[in-house]
């Protein structure tokens, strides 16, 4: 049964209903649109809002959508200044709590501290397509917030509510395939953020073959609009380069014969849901579902970009005293500034040990001023409990990858039995769990200067065997 | 298209998924189950909860369900005492706010005042069927709370989260009919709270005929389980007695010929969602949908019980000095204590004016110590903006109705154009909006003592014409 | 995913569409309804039928449904007499064929021999719900045919077309369970022909428990109306009595632990599809699907009634010279005429060998004048390739079973590897394939008279072991 | 509710089931594949076929698909020669019929005349995906038949069975839109036969806008594969050129404001269903459904190509003595041989009267040797009861249209009240019903030679008014 289509139907039903309103009324342009919006917002919070909530909510959202950018910003700021907590009540609640700290006074304090705009946002959600409108509102808010830190408090309210509304318990995992409605597929093309989909034909190559899968989370209220999706290749080896996965002329294998599931692209779809996290749940659920469907799968691994590597390396190359690069290294690396260094097989071979070692250092040792791992993709997977499994020199030769990471890609390994411990190590102690073959590039007892002469990484075939061996207890 | 079945499919998908777990682990009986639960709850709130949230959440919920009643209560109390806000942090936030009341300090205060158990409940919702389990947990909590007022704070958290999760924006309206899956229909039989459904045959009589409708709200996470439903009769007259609606041998009419939609039964289904209100939205949405489907419908009206009337009247009958009953009235009403007074046509006729007048008084004048209308059903419909339209003497001769209201039923009229004003009058000024034919029993300038000689109500046919006339601007 | 509900939706769509007509026209009562029907039928076959086929077809069917029984019969006879082949054309085609027997003249002969009414029936199928109406028409035809053998030719046309339209390739197998729409379940109650379903509660007992299954064939054009269904019990033993399957207080087992699937009731639903055979396909498909879902299932067996046994035995009891009953046997069997013989444990025990032996004889030796096995249920299962596996003395003590078969039930075993050979033996050579434990009651070299002293059947537990052993190669 | 998606689900279910087989067996390459096929075919017709029909049918079809083209042809011919009627039996039936022509002997004759291969084809349909395989088999048969007239008899059998199986009563009308699964849309792109769809973006332009519709017939057994589809534009005018319909920058109108539905493309999808007619039903059903959805629609009209016009005109241009072209006309028309005559506005204007008059003649007077209208598209629409409404000079300037019809397009008008009479006129009397504005070009009393000086057609705006006026009684 094609559940994606069912989903489409379901969402369609909801969307259609969304187009039908109670108590619709014509709206003439207002001389003071902001004042009108404020009034309506207050009405929505009042007892009138109880009688005519859906209509008022729709009116507020439509009016807001009709505002120009400057006024939208003014309205958001007004939400911060005018729809905060009732401070008198709050002060009384503080006094009562301080007087007698009990469950009752704590509760009252908590209620008094909640800004009115939270309830306003909840009531706006009554409108047809209210959730979608509010997600778009936050998208704008996030944009504006960069220059208006006072909007932070409003964003905190959105984050709070969205975390509750988009709780994983309310999300639906759906497979995306070549039988998925075109309007959803169109969005997959648009939202793909890692490896660009250039045409419907390319999309077909990612969805239709038997050894490809794609899964997305949907929310019942966001009609036909995925929240996040992941693309998966079912393979017999851990790929070291994206071309192994995406090239047109590859051999399609029988899905049931695959031993390895490769998560090669994960894209968030809704900017307005930024920092509401689903990716963790998505990957784990997909691992679960794939294991069920294909019992022969034993290895679950990503093939991931390293978006921060080139920038970091550039800093190290320019540094007066780099921890990892000798002056000589810095000179040799000048070649990275040429456009075509990767075309020259000889250079490439000579370079591999140096770049790979630097990459290991980047993951294992380099930290930002807050002590965090530099690479955002690494933070995501390591935070999910994955292990840094392999460094893939020139894994992606696309211009973007050459620019961001000198072509480097990496594999993160999801081994269910270790996920909790790995996560704990990373979250609690900031420790990056990596395979020995990665760790060996940065030996604990070795000085930085000495790193270059290290032998290059194993050929991929040997590496692959190693990865599989690392996964061997996986199915127990 | 039978959307109810689709819903069933959808919910089924979710439920099936719910049966599949990540990271399942055997659980041996614990020497200290409460301690174990507390530890797991803390783990769920910790960074471990981020890695293994679904599994931990499921474990906590399963463990809780396995506790005996006493320990369940202890755990709930522990949530109040140990999972409140971090008071040190709260005190610091209060100090910072008092020092400098800004958006930032307000936000921090609000966050600091939130009890940890709210986040705990949100994370418990990650479990498969988490929402259903939490609804059942609150059902137990509400039961326990009667004797344990300290649980109030916990209930406030549940209420807060449920109001957000069960926001009308997330509910799906579905028609219930004779093509609805039997497992859902079974629940309709079980949940019906107003006019008992004695058998599948009786259920069929309420769902299958062309002039009957039933609608329910569902939530995506409560598999196959309605939240609330309303039963509707499509008629040509406003019925004055439930027997007109439910009797076996009535004439079924063509739905398209109906002028009147009668909401004759509304039942909440989930005790654990007590006081999370849907009924208001349900009725208005159904009015909307029916108008769309049947443009000839002009009158939307309930046929409702009056559950508090007999109890109130009993007090007035015993009162030394009733406002409305003379000593002589009190004596005449002694007959209500007999089991079979309604069998005697003569008595019935003699009685009608007195009882009807008392009923008008009950609705229009009688108030509880908080100044509220006494009747809970009246509070619901008047609060929704309906108008008290007609008093139906002996509208329901079932033993329960005879006991609760001496057989009285009433109609509330939903006239969309007036809903907002009616609601406002009731919510803001405590004013009961009633049809003139009801109001005339309690004239402003008349003393209570004089009420008895009033003529009885109009025959139903005339009343019906009046109700229809009252609705005449309805469609404009 | 609940595919039954989806089916309901689908069928609903079709049915709804069926209610909408092109070119609807009022029909006044006709002075000569039969003449009008004939005219319209001719129009439907003419070129006008090509332009307005749906409307004309609907008119013909509606008019026919409005006729009284006598005229319906006249119309059917008119179809035989007036809508046969064009005899002139046929005679020419015969002449041409005899003149020159070629592919071309054969084809022309075949076309010329086809009665016009076949095309008429095909065009009537254009009407909304045409298929359902035609199935009902044949139901009436079959009734009338008993007294009007001239209708045989018309029934041959219906049979021919229905065999094509209800080809198994067009049927959909759907599971019936407790999530199936009530309107379909209602039909299951009504159509159940073997073990009466007395209430919705009894239905629930057959559908809801984990170890029960029910499957039905549906046709896309017969909205919500099953063609045939089978009820299955998943068990750990081959049951010898229907009470083991149906009693209220039995232990429900986990479906995954079952080793045996028992087909304990198969019911055809549409009288108008009499002799269009589905049962064979249904059982085999269900065997296939169950094996897939529950790999531990190794034994597929029926528990079946023996509807012709008592009647046959009555004849043997009265016979001057029975092949199998001695005069003494005949006297002893007089006791079967008492109402309560089965209540007396002593008699029952004494009787078992005699009755069981007679039963074996009934299956293995007794034949009707055409040489066919007497029992219709036996003919069905043996014709499907099943084997007569066990005779269950007093397997069903219901009044009907006592009357029809003195309580006898039997198991037929479906062993996929043997089905073809068994079918061949039965179809080609009239040979009844039976288990040795059945065959031993009628030894080839034994005279009939000597049969009585034979020992009774094995206790059920031993039998069961035997049945399982018989099935052991099943999964290879 | 998106029924297309539901359909997808349904079809998917069926297709999935199709992948599961009963009794599968390995097949080694055969020394005599044709002999093996014949044997299996005979087995399928024998009693073995009753026991193992699905497996045998699948084997026959798979084996057939594995044959090379030459052997496929041999097998088809073998079906003609070896699987005809049993001639002995047929001869006996003829004799019996001639001896005594009764309903019984007629029936026997009819049965005896049926070739065995009809039953064989019916049994092949038992195979999973049998229907689809048989449709493909006929596609090949139609190809081969061109050079092998002896295959005609086999095609007659396929036609006979397919007409029954694909009876309109079994077809499902589904809307195709931008929410339709991509695998179905892909087929729309592929099957579009009138106005090429160059890309997914072009497809989107035909499906997604509010004023566009597309409908297809599906059969339950042809998974995800439409039989025929029609593309519709909702407009305010009757378009005179395809560019009005398809150009990118046109103004999209609100569907509810449209007065006119334009059927601008109809494509059959399955070559193997050639001459099994659906188009008639499709158009009428779509007219019906659109009227229901958009009550303001009053005009239902096509914008159609004229594929035979140029070829016919070429003959007239070369003819020694054309009925319609003077020698001078023939000379003037030489310009049509240039590639770019339509680029020259002056020529175009001068040409319009001549070409339009010739076109009118082509439709109204020209006939093939069988007296049939020449244009196949005209035959289809006129045969459906449409009226030739307008000739659109240079309605399509695409190379194909310039080549086939010198750019001519026409509108056929579907006016429900006239359909039956129009069809009758055409089918019974070969009369082409045309609008007066078309007829006037070929006046009854005018000689052909005199036609040229006629004034050109009305400007489109006036024509449009006329078409609308012609439709005015339409809605009554």
Image (tube, coloured by chain):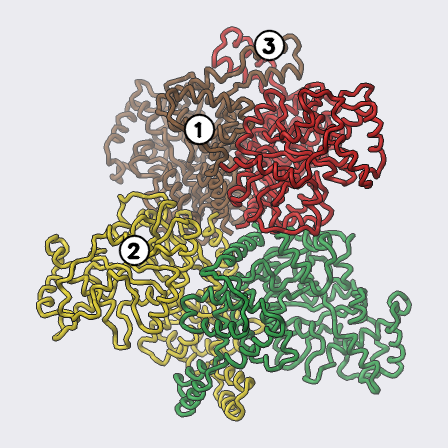
Chain colours: A green, B yellow, C brown, D red
Residue A266 in the image: state x and y as whole percent.
67, 65
In the rendered image, the vertical position of residue A310 relative to residue B20, given as above or below: below
Q: Residues within 10 Å of mark 2 (few under 14, many from 20)?
A: many
Q: Residue at x 36, y 51 (%)?
A: C250
Q: Nearer the viewer, residue B149 or B387?
A: B387
How far separated are the C-alphas under marks 1 and 3?
Answer: 34 Å
Name the mark on residue C61.
1
| Tag 1 subunit | C
How far separated are the C-alphas under marks 2 and 3?
Answer: 78 Å
Q: Is residue D236 left or right of residue B383?
A: right
Do the dots labelled 1 and 3 sit on one chain? yes
Q: Is residue D75 visible?
A: no
Q: Residue at x 11, y 70 (%)?
A: B326
Residue beneath disc 3: C92
Residue beneath disc 2: B467
Q: Is residue B352 left or right of residue A399?
A: left
Q: Which callout, 1 or 3, points at the residue further toward the start of the chain?
A: 1
Point out the frontmost of discs 1 and 3: 1
Do the dots labelled 2 and 3 sit on one chain? no
Point out the frontmost of discs 2 and 3: 2
């Amino acid at each position: 049964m094609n559940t994606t289509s069912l989903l489409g139907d379901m969402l369609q039903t909801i969307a259609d209903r969304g187009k039908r309103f109670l108590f619709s009324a014509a709206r003439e342009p207002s001389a003071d649109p902001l004042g009108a919006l404020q009034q309506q917002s207050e009405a929505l919070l009042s007892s009138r809002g109880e009688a005519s909530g859906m209509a008022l909510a729709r009116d507020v959202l439509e009016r807001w959508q009709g505002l120009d950018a400057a006024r939208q910003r003014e309205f958001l700021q007004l939400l911060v200044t005018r729809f905060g907590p009732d401070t008198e009540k709050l002060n009384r609640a503080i006094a009562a709590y301080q007087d007698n700290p009990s469950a009752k006074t704590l509760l009252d304090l908590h209620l008094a501290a909640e800004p009115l705009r939270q309830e306003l946002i909840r009531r706006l959600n009554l409108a047809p397509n209210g959730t979608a409108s509010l997600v778009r509102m936050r998208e704008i808010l996030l944009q504006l917030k960069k220059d208006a830190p006072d909007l932070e408090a409003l964003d905190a309210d959105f984050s709070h509510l969205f975390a509750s509304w988009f709780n994983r318990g309310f999300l639906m995992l759906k497979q995306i395939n070549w039988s998925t409605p075109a309007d959803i597929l169109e969005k997959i093309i648009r939202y793909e953020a890692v490896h660009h989909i250039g045409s419907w034909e390319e999309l077909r190559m990612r969805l239709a073959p038997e050894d490809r899968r794609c899964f997305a989370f949907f929310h019942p209220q966001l009609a036909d609009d995925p929240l996040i999706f992941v693309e998966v290749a079912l393979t017999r080896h851990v790929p070291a380069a994206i071309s192994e996965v995406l090239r047109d002329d590859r051999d399609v294998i029988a899905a049931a014969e695959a031993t390895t599931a490769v998560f090669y692209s994960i894209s968030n779809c809704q900017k307005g849901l930024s920092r509401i996290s689903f990716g963790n749940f998505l990957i784990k659920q997909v691992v679960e579902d794939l294991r069920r469907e294909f019992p022969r799968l034993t290895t679950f691994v990503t093939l991931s970009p390293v978006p921060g590597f080139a920038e970091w390396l550039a800093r190290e190359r320019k540094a007066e005293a780099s921890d990892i690069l000798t002056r000589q290294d810095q000179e040799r690396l000048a070649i990275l500034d040429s456009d075509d260094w990767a075309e020259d097989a000889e250079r490439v071979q000579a370079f591999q040990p140096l770049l790979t070692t630097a990459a290991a250092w980047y993951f294992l040792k380099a930290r930002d001023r807050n002590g965090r791992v530099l690479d955002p993709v690494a933070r995501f997977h390591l935070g999910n409990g994955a292990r840094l499994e392999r460094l893939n020199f020139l894994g992606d030769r696309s211009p973007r990858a050459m620019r961001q990471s000198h072509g480097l890609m990496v594999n993160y390994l999801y081994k269910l039995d270790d996920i909790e411990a790995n996560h704990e190590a990373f979250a609690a102690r900031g420790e990056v769990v990596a395979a020995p073959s990665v760790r060996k590039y940065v030996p604990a007892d070795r000085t930085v200067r000495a790193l270059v002469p290290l032998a290059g990484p194993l050929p991929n075939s040997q590496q692959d065997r190693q990865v599989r061996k690392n996964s061997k207890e996986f199915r127990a």
